[in-house]
Amino acid sequence: MSEAYSGGSADSASCDENANAAALGAADWLCLAAAPTFAIMALLTGALDGRPADMLCSVARASPLSGMVPMYLLMSAFHSAPWLKLISSRRSGVRRS
């Protein structure tokens, strides 16, 4: 059986490794999208808060922590770890140079 049909070529292994590395790189950058997305959603929700349609759908707010804006801000804070790691790694890289 030839090497092209056996699936045991070195080229296929390097392609798989490159694809895995690309997927991991994309996942690293994708995790950076969560915090700004939630922050933008908090801003938009806060800007649109108080419109008549919101008044119909909202429940009486018993606490300042109830509602969508605080929820989006908390989600943005909880998803800020990748940004903090990125900033930390860049600062430590600058110090070493």
Image (spheres, grey):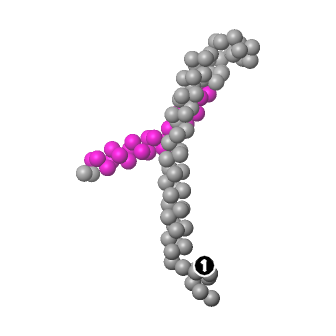
The residue closer to the viewer here, 90 or 5, is 5
- Residue 51 colored in magenta in the image: no
Q: Name which residue type carries label 1.
A: Gly
Is 7 located above or below residue 53 in the figure?
below
Do we see residue 20 in this rendering? yes
Q: Quadrant of residue 6?
A: bottom right
- Residue 90 colored in magenta in the image: yes
The residue closer to the viewer here, 33 or 8, is 8
Q: Quadrant of residue 44?
A: top right
Q: Is residue 63 left or right of residue 92?
A: right
- Find residue 26 and report its horizontal and vertical position in percent: 52, 51
Range drawn in magenta: 70-95
Q: Residue at (50%, 38%) from the top-left corner?
A: 80
Specify the principal SS of the magenta part: helix
Is 16 located above or below residue 49 in the figure?
below
- Residue picked out by circle 1: 7
The residue closer to the viewer here, 18 or 58, is 18
Q: Residue at (57%, 25%) from the top-left corner?
A: 42
Residue lying at the far bottom of the rendered structure = 1
- Find residue 95 and report its horizontal and vertical position in percent: 27, 47
Q: Is residue 90 left or right of residue 51?
A: left
Q: Residue at (51%, 77%) from the top-left corner?
A: 10
Total numbered circles: 1
The crowd level at tag 1 (other Cα within 10 Å; few <14, some 14-19, many 20+) is: few
Do we see residue 74 in this rendering? no
Q: Quadrant of the N terminus?
A: bottom right
Is 95 located above or below residue 63 in the figure?
below
- Find residue 3 and report its horizontal and vertical position in percent: 57, 84
**Dot 1: element:** loop
Q: Residue at (62%, 16%) from the top-left corner?
A: 49
- Find residue 32 and report its horizontal and vertical position in percent: 50, 42
